[in-house]
Image (tube, grey):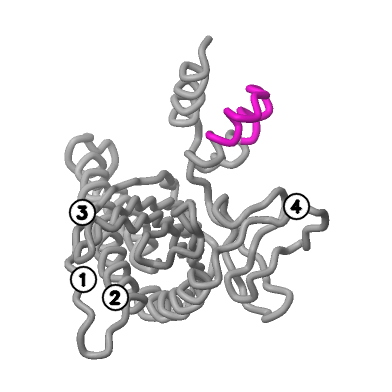
Amino acid sequence: MSYEDKFDASLDLLRRLDPRSIQTNLNDICTLVGDEELVQDLLSSVDTPLTTAQCGETGKMYLCCDYNRDGDSYRSPWSNKYYPSISGDELPPYPSDLLRQLEIKANDSFDVYRDLYYEGAGVSSVYLWDTAEDESAGLEEGFAGVVLFKKETEDGSGKWDSIHVFEVIPQSKTSILYKLTSSVILDLQKSQGSSLSLSGNLTRQLETSQVVELEGGVNLETFHLINLGTLIEKSEYNIRNLLQEVYFDKLKDIMLKDLRSIGDISDKKLEELRQQQIVKGLQSL
């Protein structure tokens, strides 16, 4: 079996397994295939629920993913240090000094976004990396990054993970292309008295070209933050509406219209109440 066949077969198998156990299933498949290159490609291609860690220097919480990982250590966006610390002659990956300054501002900006759109709860993190061969080239040569959000309900019955991977590509001196791939991992566990639970993920892509206009005190850093914030806001709004209006409304139609009720009216009302509980779980995220 060729490398491509193994990769496609692994992804196909993951799509058919329980999405609530995606991390365990992915680890088992990586152990089974054994090929280091294939393992790295699978880890970078499959979105898994985000985990949290605490920055040892600032005490702030941050999110861990494949984009801030080096071995078993994860870089904090607040202190720019890896935890656990990495020893050895080979340095782990860091953004260039100029990009690090933008990363600090991006984390502050999207922390405000999280506070507004996630009702003051949850955790956010932003990680940037250089795409130009010459790391001293500056923001004019483009860069890439990821914006992460994670929120759980107080009782742990609902979990929302947003992963927004973007690339900033200069098209000319006056035009910039933004490419965004957004994935949302949703997990609504059954609550007391309910027999329903939902989990899965949804991925959508957006891209837009913007004319560079640096007026009124707006520099290139601020210009990028405004455009990225607008694009991510639009992407999350679209995905949330798709989950709410398509998947949940379709589930309601199947439960209450397409399937014949065999119980009395009180049973039907109970099912409606259970459906409302799931929708409320989504709305609370």
Q: Residue at x 31, y 48 (%)?
A: 267
Mark 1 vs mark 3: in front = 1
Mark 3 vs mark 2: in front = 2
Looking at the image, do the residues carrying marks 2 and 1 touch, with CB atoms under 8 Å apart? yes
Q: Please tell me in which quadrant of the rendered image residue 240 appears.
A: bottom left
Q: Secondary structure at mark 2?
A: helix
- Of the numbered discs 3 and 2, the one sitting upstream in the chain is 2
- Of the numbered discs 2 and 4, the one sitting upstream in the chain is 4
- What label does residue 120 carry, if any? none
- What label does residue 223 carry, if any? 2
CA gap between label 4 and label 3 equals 50 Å
Q: Secondary structure at mark 3?
A: helix
Q: Secondary structure at mark 4?
A: loop
Looking at the image, do the residues carrying marks 4 and 1 touch, with CB atoms under 8 Å apart? no
Magenta residues span: 27-41
Name the residue carrying label 4.
90
Main SS, magenta residues: helix
Amino acid tagged 3: Glu
* Left or right, residue 101 beside residue 266: right
Q: Residue at x 63, y 22 (%)?
A: 33
Does any portion of residue 48 appear in the rendered image?
yes
CA gap between label 2 and label 1 equals 8 Å
Looking at the image, do the residues carrying marks 1 and 3 touch, with CB atoms under 8 Å apart? no
Question: Which quadrant does the C terminus fall into?
Answer: bottom left
Mark 2 vs mark 1: in front = 1
Name the residue carrying label 1.
212
CA gap between label 4 and label 1 equals 38 Å
Name the residue carrying label 3.
245
